[in-house]
Amino acid sequence: MNHQDTAAALLPLLGGAGNVRTVGHCMTRLRVEVADRSAVRGAELRALPGVLGVVEDGESWQIVLGPGTVAQVAPELERLATAESPAESLAERGATLRERQRARNATPGKLFLRRLAQIFVPLIPALVGCGVIAGATGLLANLHWLPALVPALSAIASGFMSLIAVFVGYRTAKEFGGTPVLGGAVAAVIVYPGVAHVAVLGRQLAPGQGGVLGALGAALLGTVVEKACRRVVPEALDVLVTPSLTVLLPGLVTLYGLMFVAGEVSAAIGRCAEWLLANGGAVAGFALGGLFLPLVMLGLHQALIPIHTTLIAERGSTVLLPLLAMAGAGQVGAALAVYVRLARDVSVRRVIRSALPAALLGIGEPLIYGVSLPLGRPFATACVGGAFGGAFVGLCHQLGYSVGATAIGPSGWALFPLLAGNHGLGRAVVVYGLGLLVGYGVGFGATYLFGVRGPGPALSPFPGGSAPGPPLLKRRRG
């Protein structure tokens, strides 16, 4: 089924165009807000070919389609929903619902994390693409192959990262209600080479100082100034005065304060991550690998996105992502153990077979929502597998063999092309690969021994011991 057919099949199951308020997506999930959740045919949704899992969160339905597919289905579904109701766009029809949802879920923590995700998640495809090219460039350079091409590839891989502050500023202003291009303009001062001629407290600034954190702060300040100007500047002067002040005032604050402060914070994040792994690598890896799956369930993993991005911008790679990826390895091991133990449960084994390839590439939602959470214990034993895998990678870092990722987004086997290490790519691959094997093995062993009571269809999480696909779960974000 191609993406047009998938979108066409999804629309009636979501209650039709009149029931669809907004359509969006992240790396793996199609996120649809509906007017009447009772009109959604959940059982048929989860049975639809290509749907890996379904999660209901109030009026929002999250349909797991996997990376790549979701990016093609989302615009097609939005086009179909709008075409069937041309008098009113999805954005207009969704305004009232969004306001009601925001009022109900407007806790500071939830709003902060949601906005962080909205700022950074759209940048992940570029981070992944440039990261893969950077990895290939490093490999060619180490092998002394195609020396004439290496500089060109290096330029392509580095171009986006050198200007990431501009993109973060653009996205920040858009998310917080400012003019996106003005947010990008304010943040652009951070990467402008001419800042090297500006001295603050007797110290010269460096282009890029402050990185993505500085860009966030600059664009936020620009949005505040822009909104204030819109309230007080006469309409006749607005087109000249508001953009000028929005760029000038935050720009000065950024140069004479924010770049220095954000630069110190960014450097401190890098030093903290290195110190943590150098002095307590095994313990830190155990905690990070073991707690990541619960963080994903609570939506708190979004807070790590700017930290990863800062580490990549400051140091070229994030040492945290390979540790966190071990949680997915524990999940795979747990699923394999369930597959072996529940030899007579056809429904569970079918879900595992369909979800396992995606899980090996770091897409864990189908197994989480389809197997481990409904069964209960395998979720805990999967965390144990992730903890031991993380402890192994952390211990290797503590012993002097660090491994990092040059981009965020993928994990599992998909992270191999993005790896970097202080002893070269080869050893980084070995450390990360062994970590995955530890996660698989411990996740499998813990689940086989303690995660499943015994074989038999009575243990199926599905009513009647069978289901056409991944189960439908209802949850509220913490």
Image (cartoon, grey):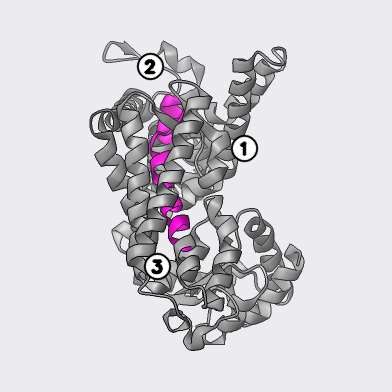
Regarding residue 239, the answer to whether it shows in the image is no
Looking at the image, is mark 3 or mark 1 earlier in the sequence?
3
Spatial CA span between label 3 and label 1: 33 Å
Residue 244 is situated, as x and y percent measured from the top left of the image, at 48, 34
Q: Are marks 2 and 3 in contact (CB under 8 Å)?
A: no
Residue visible at 35% across and 74% down in the picture:
453
Residue visible at 51% across and 76% down in the picture:
471
Amino acid carrying label 2: it is: Leu
Mark 3 neighbour class, 10 Å CA radius: few under 14, some 14 to 19, many 20 or more:
few
In this picture, which residue range is highlighted in magenta? 309-335
Residue picked out by circle 2: 205
Work out whether 49 lies above or below 330.
below
Residue visible at 59% across and 43% down in the picture:
125
Residue picked out by circle 1: 129
Residue 102's tag is: 3
- In this view, the residue in front, 385 or 47, is 385
Amino acid carrying label 1: it is: Gly
Mark 2 neighbour class, 10 Å CA radius: few under 14, some 14 to 19, many 20 or more:
many
Looking at the image, is mark 2 or mark 3 earlier in the sequence?
3
